[in-house]
Image (cartoon, helix red, strand yellow):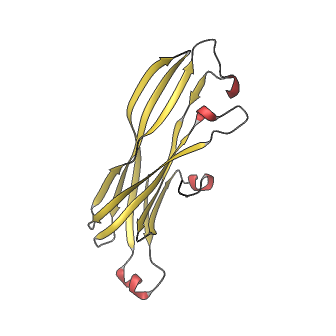
Amino acid sequence: MAAALMLVPSTGMAQQAEGAITLDIRAEKRCLDKEKKSEHNAMVTTEKWVYEVAIKNGSFRDLAGLSVEYRMFMKDDSVRTKSTKIPLRKKEGTTPIEALANLAVFKFQTEVMEIETSMLDSGWVYKDKGNKRKSKDSLYGIWLRVMKDEKMVAEYVNPPTLKDKEKWQAE
């Protein structure tokens, strides 16, 4: 999913004369590793996921001094009970962009987030999960902000409903 965002500064003629910052942001999730093992009465699968992010400068000028702040979110099924919704767990990160030439693409990979699935052996169930045999975490989404001089110049949220469920705040 891609998002093109154009923000024009609203304060001061000098800033407006400098021009808008236009960035095309893409983020694709990717599984790096998958490991299965038997633990007690269950088969447990651990997967390592990242987002591969690409930011293209479409501002018709070179940019410098940018940074990307991101929050990755996963549904953590291991703490859900039959009476609660699956909570979201987040992982934060920051990546600097020293310089980004016009029409250049900056690529980076987020930190790894581990996702775990467990399937109980036949005859066993999770009593606190409504008598289910399976517990499965899932990668839910990513929220990125591109910053310049401590001000947000672009934002990317996938899925878009993530902004309704979570707030952007530092841990």
Can residue 94 be seen in this snapshot? yes
Indicate the position of residue 167 as horizontal and vertical percent values.
59, 56
Q: From the viewer's side, name the closer residue of 140 and 68.
A: 68
Can residue 130 be seen in this snapshot? no
Which of the 4 image quadrants contains residue 19? Answer: bottom left
Indicate the position of residue 109 as horizontal and vertical percent values.
35, 47
What residue is shown at x 58% (from left), y 56% (from top)? 163
What residue is shown at x 59% (from left), y 32% (from top)? 78
Indicate the position of residue 74 as horizontal and vertical percent values.
53, 42
What residue is shown at x 39% (from left), y 86% (from top)? 14
Farthest-out residue, top: 123
| Left or right: 111, with 87 as reference point | left
Say if 28 sits above or below 148 in the image.
above
| Left or right: 131, with 167 as reference point | right
Which of the 4 image quadrants contains residue 85? Answer: top right
What residue is shown at x 44% (from left), y 76% (from top)? 8
| Left or right: 24, with 116 as reference point | left
